[in-house]
Image (tube, helix red, strand yellow):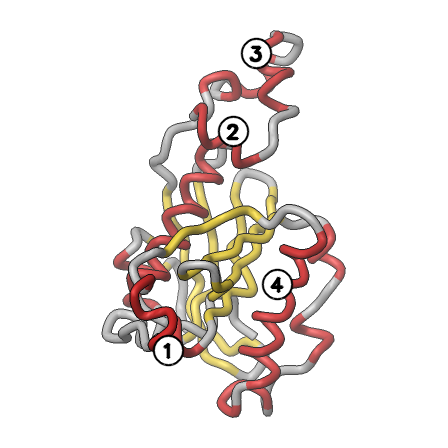
Amino acid sequence: MPDGGRVEELTSATVDLASATQSRADDIRVTIASGFDDLVRCMVIRGVVWLGEDEAKDRTDYASLFDPNDHSCTHLLVWVGDEPAGTMRLRWNHGFVRFERLAVRTRFRSFRLFRRLARFAFDLAAAKGFTHANALARLGTEKAWKLVGAEIVGPELEFHGERAFPMVATLTGRTCTALAAGLAAAGNMDFEEAIGLPDAKLMEIA
């Protein structure tokens, strides 16, 4: 299952909302999952998209969709109005952040939503001091990734039965000032306080 999967043809997709939520179609926001309820929302969205949709369910197995990394990642939720519409997880590695398990519910898919989610993820990683992001983009989504600043860095490959491309983005967002010096600032009170802040607060002071 390539990371960045169920968002195919985002550049031409439109938001197709039920009439009850049509007035809030432009009310797209992204939050960091906080607490059990948010994690449930993330997992439900991922399951609905990858295990429930006809196009994906025959080539996706539960064990590859949910793994122990879910307990050590940052999970993002994208909302349309009050409705949870999509999710992505961020896995922090040495020198880069990996974007994984991207899933957007069918009726909410649009490039506008994807761009908002990607930019939030970029800005969060930059605020924490990361300079690069990586994703394995499913064939058909590479144009959307390029439009948000990522680049193909390797040849097409087959991963879990699908064709995909390795993508890398250079992060240009602001790093939290207290963390910009890295470990050289360890012991400084500003550094120590910033380290203890929730990610959302860290982004606010970057």
Q: Nearer the viewer, mark 4 or mark 3?
A: 4
Alpha carbon of mark 2 to alpha carbon of mark 3: how far? 12 Å
Q: Earlier in the sequence, mark 4 or mark 3?
A: 4
Q: Nearer the viewer, mark 3 or mark 1?
A: 1
Q: Are marks 2 and 1 in contact (CB under 8 Å)?
A: no
Which residue is farthest top?
A: 188
Q: Earlier in the sequence, mark 3 or mark 1?
A: 1
Please name the amino acid that badge 2 sits on.
Leu
> Could you say which is closer to the camera, residue 202 or residue 24?
24
User: Percent position (x, y) of residue 62?
Assistant: 70, 78
Position of 205 with respect to 41 (left or right) is left
The residue that disc 2 covers is: 202
Q: Earlier in the sequence, mark 2 or mark 1?
A: 1
Q: Residues within 10 Å of mark 2 (few under 14, many from 20)?
A: many
Q: Residues within 10 Å of mark 1 (few under 14, many from 20)?
A: few
User: Percent position (x, y) of residue 194?
Assistant: 58, 21
Q: Is residue 81 above or below residue 162?
A: above
Position of 151 with respect to 55 (left or right) is left
The disc at residue 18 is 1
Alpha carbon of mark 4 to alpha carbon of mark 1: how far? 20 Å
The residue that disc 4 covers is: 41
Please name the amino acid that badge 1 sits on.
Ala
